[in-house]
Amino acid sequence: MNLHSLSVFRFRKERIEELVSIPGIIAYSHHFTDEGKWIGGKVSSVKLKDLSNSFYPLKQIIPEGVKGTKNEPIFGKAYYLETDRGCSERCKFCFVGNCRFPRTSRSLDSLIDIIDQAGEVNDFDKIVLYGSAIAQSGILDELIEYIVDKGYEVSCSSFRADYLSEKLLKALRKGKQRTLSLAPETGDENLRMALNKRMEDETIFSALKLAWDTGFRRLKLYMIYGFPCEEEKIKDSTKDFLSTVRERHFPTGRIGISMNQFITKAHTPFQFAPMIGVKESKEEQKWYKSNLYQIKNIDLSLYAPEWSIIQRVLSLQNHEYYPVIYQIARGRNTVGSWKLALKEIDSNLDQEAKWKYETNEPLPWDHITHTLEKKTLISSYMKYLETMECK
């Protein structure tokens, strides 16, 4: 090693030492041996307790002169405003609800202050409000009314049906939001309860009727299939649920359905659950295509099962999969490239979908501590298996 290389090596080592002194930072060369064994103590996941007084970037990149072109952003000339982080609902499949529990939010005063300051340094027509549990704050209707009074349009991410009110829906209409997005996840009420998505069908139907009466004519529903121990009758329940939505609550207008496969995520109760393979997933999608298109004015969007399984690889695998990630990073990020990379380690997409961690097995992320302990996640998973009578 020459003097220059030695100097670079020392500089890099010093920088890594500085970085790992920051709470929440993990560096491979510092926390792992060359064989991938964890060394040292546990690292706590960092979570802001006071979002209202935390830094927020006032100046944002908002393209000019792109309206009507292919370069126009999906929300146009919009300013993005984060209202909250995390979630306290703890749906068993959700990373945010378990890894970022409990929810924390910005106060109405702090959000108004950001809007006022942002308006002085940016040129925008719309404010996009985003967060993982945006309606739970109880101040969203007041915030939207303030935004509208300032002359801006507004757009929000999906809501929980049990937090929708007439006041909130009217505020959204004033802000010129045309599409209402909800995430029922499944049309089977019993499965929804087992997932800890604790909403009865009638709660969702009541929210939809309220939205219709308020003037909404576009609806987006996020659905998931392939949950652990999901029985065939679930598909029929989902079809009946969506038929009821159309016939009773949204008799006209477009209903967009995003139907995606369940994906195993780390730091959730379902981190121990397998997924269905590519062929089985495509058969599920074929059933939904042929049955849901019988419902009038339905737009069905499906996500390729291959990419769902690839997400699982990225979420659950350990350092031994570095050669796979490295090969993809150097080449092309395509399904074919993933298949070749997995083949080189004697694996394939179906194997990656169906293997699973046991509840008594060490996990690659056990050295990262969160608010919810591993035993809590295991208990939640076992309760689900019992409720669904899984074998």
Image (cartoon, rainbow, N blue to C red):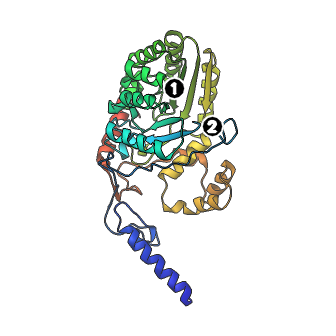
Residue occupied by mark 2: 279
> Which residue is painted at 56% across and 42% down in the image?
308
Q: Is residue 252 above or below residue 256?
A: above
Count the marks. 2
Residue 177 is marked as 1
Q: Amino acid at mark 2?
A: Lys
Judging depth in this view, the residue of 274 and 252 nearest the camera is 252
Residue 321 percent location from the top left of the image: 54, 60
User: Dot 2 lies on which element?
Assistant: helix
Q: Is residue 299 above or below residue 87?
A: above
Residue 258 percent location from the top left of the image: 56, 30
Please give left or right for residue 102 compared with residue 210 in the image: left
How many neighbours does mark 1 have within 10 angstroms: few (below 14), some (14-19), or many (20 or more)?
Answer: some
Residue 284 is marked as none
Please give left or right for residue 62 compared with residue 356 in the image: right
Q: Is residue 287 above or below residue 21?
A: above
